[in-house]
Amino acid sequence: MYARAWLSEAHAVDAPPIVLVHGLGVSGRYMIPTARILALHGRVYAPDLPGFGRSAKPPRPLNVAECADALAAWMRATNLT
């Protein structure tokens, strides 16, 4: 899964990560204005769910539960859980 990240050096180590999740029909790019503001306070990630933005397209559209599973797997893989 592709993700954009914003890191504030002042808060990169001690601040909890913030994950912004886009809705259906858009991508993580939609979250850029919010991410830039929140990055003043810590690490911000805006992943593109499968089939959106720069993430790979699955063989078929995923339902909401499958998108949630993909997001959870990405968070585990990037040590954000």
Image: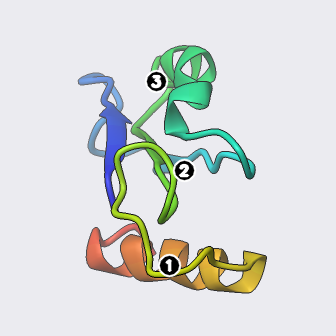
User: What is the C-alpha distance between the residues marked 3 and 1?
Assistant: 24 Å
The one of 66 and 80 positioned closer to us in this rendering: 66
Which numbered tag is attached to residue 70? Answer: 1
Tag 1 or tag 2, which sits nearer the N-term?
2
From the viewer's perspective, is 35 left or right of 55?
right
Three-letter amino acid code of the residue under disc 2: Val
Tag 3 or tag 2, which sits nearer the N-term?
2
Crowding at dot 1, Cα within 10 Å, few <14 / some 14-19 / many 20+, comes out as some
User: What is the C-alpha distance between the residues marked 2 and 3?
Assistant: 11 Å
Marks 2,3: beta carbons within 8 A: no
Which numbered tag is attached to residue 19? Answer: 2
From the viewer's perspective, is 3 left or right of 34?
left
Q: Mark 3 points at which residue?
A: 39
Classify the position of the N terminus by image quarter. bottom left
Task: Name the residue: 71% across, 45% down.
Answer: 25
Marks 2,1: beta carbons within 8 A: no
Indicate whether 22 appears above or below 31.
Answer: below
Task: Name the residue: 60% across, 29% down.
Answer: 31
> Where is residue 77 shown, x and y percent of the image?
28, 78
> Where is residue 20 shown, x and y percent of the image?
60, 45
Tag 1 or tag 3, which sits nearer the N-term?
3
Tally of numbered tags: 3
- Nearer the observer: mark 3 or 1; the answer is 1
> Where is residue 51 shown, x and y percent of the image?
49, 61
Three-letter amino acid code of the residue under disc 1: Ala
Classify the position of the C terminus by image quarter. bottom left
